[in-house]
Structures are given as structure tokens and as C-alpha cells.
Amino acid sequence: MDFTWIPEYQNLLLHGVFLTFLLLAISVPLGFGLAIFLAIAQVGDNPIARWISKGYCTFFRGTPLLIQLWLIYYGLGSYLPYIPGLRASFLWPVLREGLFFATLALTLNFAAYQGEILRGAMLAVPKGELEAARAVGMSPGMILRRIWLPRAIRIGLPTFAGEVVLQLKATPIVFSVTVMDLYGAAYKIRQDTLLVYEPLLLVTVFYVTLTFVITQVFQKLENAVPVRR
Amino acid sequence: MSPSTSVLDMLSITPPGWGGVLITGAFATLFISFGAYLFGMTLGLFGALGKLSGIRPLQYALNLYTTIVRAVPELILIVSLYYAGTDGLNRILALADFGPIEVNGLVAAIAVLGFVQGAYMTEVLRGAILAIPVGQVEAAKAFGMRPGLRFRRIVLPALIPNALPGFANLWMSVIKDSALIAVVGYQELALAARVAASNTKQYMVFFLAAAALYLVITIVSNMLFSALEGYFRRGQRPVA
């Protein structure tokens, strides 16, 4: 085992850790926000919205993330330059980067899985609570905001930690679209130093630790939001 | 060539089109996934029985296996096991005075994905076995059934309906994980689509076609598993 390369590649590794965190910190909240709309559309009355939401979830849950990522990076990416004015705009430096497409793919993918969970959670909210809200004269929007969604999110909370861990485990895939996240850094180190195991081992330790931290944080969060059974 | 006809031309089965390559890739995906699934199920069965055996060292070893495999990203596991596996095998062969061998990509893919599946299968099967009412196993013991007979006649038939939802999830995940094999260079559906796309520069067309093939596989599998669960749960009270 040879770990003498660590100081030399310190910056690359730290930047990789930063990108991994960034991918997670953007895709999880944005994906969760999108998931709320997907879940509402699926339990709502509008058949078109329900149909679109169902189709979206089926597509993103039924195909590999790798294909979605390549579809967005190579497929969508190849059309972007043809949109007039985009190339000259201030957005172009961001839109040109693999990181943008990677975040987009991870967000859309996370939203599909989380949306399906939230749909189940919304259906699991006891009917009596919604009826009580209606009985005190709350408007449908207010019921959704004050009763239905908060209760559904609390019901779905135990699975949320698992979903975030799954999302963390999905992030290394972005190295295939030139994003130098932690795994990308390890990949480069392997190519440079011809060491097969050591970089992978270091990265593995990081992912396992982060998984542990995430589960602990959510355990705390779950305990902080009491629920009566 | 107008765009609409050229898309159909590119997806045609015969060589100027890349449809045949995609279909072959889809079959490779199915083959790898099925092989890995069966291998993982075998590992999982032994893993679950080992975890429930009450032999301490075996339990620790199996807990280490399932915890690590489930905490490390699949991509990293697949890449490391792919290289470490072939490298390790050649070192063992070198110790036994054999020359290095080129490990077949298909075999390596199945072994690696199966090893990952095995950890999840262990947990699914362990839960399914624990969900069997104790009384049924005790009754079998009271009749004087030997452990082997007890497993075959009582435990196995009772665990299948409990394990089926987990099995269905794992089948879906092995189909999707098999795309990661593309990263180490074995040509299944994802890599086939990428090769076709980069040759024709029609990325959208081929990745959408690959996505459609994956969707067909997952949707058909979903229906099969629902039917299977209906069959195995016949005579049971419907669950929620």
C-alpha cells in the first residue's frame, strides 16, 4: 500500500470532495421541490397533470441514470449551441460545463424517485385530518400547505435518508461527462500513478464515512420532529 | 436525406442502420442482468442462512460484506472489483505457476454485478425468512423434519411471497446497474448506444432509443413480477 501520492494530489482531491458535496447540495433540495409538484399532480384531479407526472416518474425510474446523463449531456448539449443568442449570453460558461448537465440529470432523477415516495406518503395521510381541515373552513390551497404536505413529508421522512444516501452513491457516475468529482479525481490519480487500489480505497472510505454521517444527521432530524403513534 | 427518413434509416436493423447493434446490446444487458441476478440470489440465500445460523464469526463476516457493499457507490464497486478481480485471479494463477489469463468480459461483468446483488439479496432473504411465523417452523420441527427437509418444504415456500417485492426491486436495480458495466468497456445496451451515437453524431436519437429499450424491459418485468406475486400469494389475504 502506497499513499505517498496524497500530498501531491491534495488539491485535486479536495476539489473533488467539494464537487461531490455541491452535486448533492444542489440536486437534493431542487429534486425535492420538483418532487412535491410531481406528487401533487399525481394525487390531484387534473388528468393531464397526472398523466404527465406518471410518465415522468416511469421514464426516470425505468431507465439507468447513466443513459439519462448521456442523453442530457450529449443529446441536449448538442442542441444548445443552436439556440440563438445563448452562446453570447452570460449563461454560456455555465451551460458549457459538464457539471451543469450532471446536476440537471441528478436532480431530475432524484425528483422522480422522491416524487413517487411523496405520492405514497400523501395518500397515507389519514382522511380524517383532511376532513377536519375542510370542516374548519380551510381552502384547498391552505389544506395542502398547512396539513397535507407537512404530514406527508413527516410520513416520508424515514425513507428520505435512504434516498439521499442512494443519491450520494449515484454521484460518481458524473465522471463519465468530464466532471472531476471525488471519483473523477481518483480516476485521474490512477491513470497518473498506475496505482489501482489505493485511490479507490481512499475514495471508498470517504463515501462510507459520508453515508454514516448522513444517516446520523437524519436520525437526529427524525427525533427532532416528534410523531405520535 | 431529410431528417425523418434518416432517423428511421439509422435505427434499421441491417448494417447501415444501428438498430441491430442496439438490439444485440439489449440482449447482452438482459443476459448479464439475469446471470448476475441468479448468482446474487445464490449468494444471498447462503448469506441469509449464514446470518441466521447463529455462528458468530460467520455473522460478523457477512455483516461486513453487506454493510460495505451497500455503503459504497455501485460504480466504484464495479470498477474496483472488475480490476481487482482479474488482477487477483492472475496473481493466484501466477502462484500456482500458470500464466496470466484474459478474463472474459461477460463473466467478469456477471461476477461483479452478482457480488453486489448478493449483499442486497442477503438482506431481502433474511427479512423474508424472519417474517415466517415461528409456529410454522416449530410445527415442522415437532413433526421431526430434518433441517434440509424443513427448509425445502416449509421455509422456502413460505419465504417466496415475502421476498418477491424485494426481488422485483432488485431485478429493476440490476438492469439499471448493468449500464455501469459500459464504463469498464463491455458492450451492453448503454455502450452500444454510445458507440452508435458517437459514430453518427445523433446522440439524441440513439440515447432515446436505448432509453426506450430499457423502459420496455423494466415495464414488461414489472408486469411479470406482479403476475408472479399474484400467483404466489394466492389464498393469502390481500396486503394493503
Image (cartoon, rainbow, N blue to C red):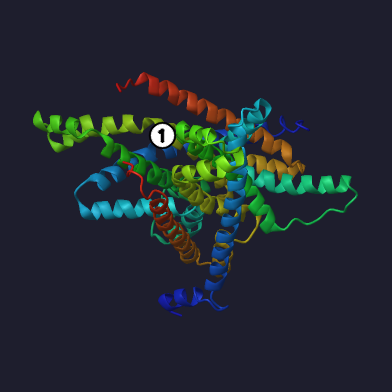
Q: Quadrant of the N terminus of chain A?
A: top right
**What residue occupies the far right of the structure in this picture?**
B97
**Considering the image in quadrants, where does the C terminus of chain A appear?**
top left
For disc 1, the marked residue is A159
- Mark 1 Cα within 10 Å, few/some/many (few <14, many 20+)? few
Q: Quick one: A13 or B127, which is closer to the camera?
A: B127
**Disc 1 residue type (three-letter):** Thr
Q: Secondary structure at mark 1?
A: helix
> Residue B143 at x, y = what percent?
53, 36
Q: Is residue A27 left or right of residue A14?
A: left
Mark 1 chain: A
Q: Residue at x 78, y 44 (%)?
A: B88
Q: Give left or right: position of A108 versus B40.
A: left
Q: Is residue A93 visible?
A: no
Does B13 sit left or right of A147 as displayed? right
At a point 33% along the width and 42% down the height, the residue shown is: B239
Q: Which residue extends farthest front?
A: B143
Q: Residue at x 49, y 62 (%)?
A: B210
Looking at the picture, how far across and down is residue B111, in whole percent? 66, 50
Q: Is residue A139 above or below residue B205?
A: above
